[in-house]
Image (cartoon, rainbow, N blue to C red):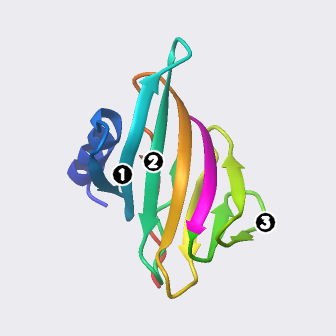
Amino acid sequence: MDQVKLKEEQLNALTAGVGTTYVQGGIKRTVLQKTQFPQGYTINFNLIEVPAGSSAAPHIHPGLELTYVLDGEFDLVTEGKPDKRFTAGMSYMVEDQDVHFARVLSANPMKLLCVFVNKENEPVAKVVGSPEAR
C-alpha cells in the first residue's frame, strides 16, 4: 500500500464523525456513535463490513476492540495466537496493539458491531500490512 493512501486512511480513521462511512485496509467502517470518555480516551461505536471471500489488511488498535458478530463466517487471525472461527451471534475482544485481521470464509459479507476504546487523538485503527491474496 502506498504511503499517501495509508496516511489518508489513518486521517479518515482519526477524523471520521458520526454517520461517516470510510474504507480502511479493505474494511468498510460506519461510525454510529463517538464520544470522549473517560478523560484521555475516545469511544467509537462502528458497523464494520468486509466483503465475502476477502481478507482485511493486518492492523492494530491503540486500545481495545469489543465486537459482536452480526453476519458472516470468518477466521480472526491474530499474530502469535491460534486462528479463531466466528459466526453470527458470537463476540470477542482484541487487546491493545495486537496485530490482527479477518479472513472472511462465508458467501455473506462479514458484518460486525464494534466498540473501540482508544487513546484520544489516535485513529481507530492503523494498517500494518497488506491483505492476503485470495
Q: Which residue is mark 3?
A: 82
| Residue at the image point whose x is 29% and y is 38% from the top | 16
- Residue 68 colored magenta? yes
Q: Which residue is mark 2?
A: 46
Mark with earlier residue (1, 3): 1
The answer to whether the residue labelled 1 contacts the one labelled 3, judged by CB atoms less than 8 Å apart, is no
| Residue at the image point whose x is 50% and y is 66% from the top | 111
Q: Nearer the viewer, mark 1 or mark 3?
A: 1
Left or right of residue 95: residue 102: left
Circle 1 — which element?
strand
The answer to whether the residue labelled 1 contacts the one labelled 2, judged by CB atoms less than 8 Å apart, is yes
- Tag 3: residue type? Pro
- Residue 117 colored magenta? no
Give residue 12's position: percent from left, percent from top: 28, 42
In the picture shown, does residue 3 fall above or below 11? below
Left or right of residue 93: residue 14: left
In the picture shown, does residue 14 fall above or below 82? above
Give residue 65's position: percent from left, percent from top: 60, 44
Quadrant the N terminus occupies = bottom left
Circle 3 — which element?
loop
Q: Residues within 10 Å of mark 1 (few under 14, many from 20)?
A: many
| Residue at the image point whose x is 48% and y is 41% from the top | 45
Q: Which residue is mark 1?
A: 30
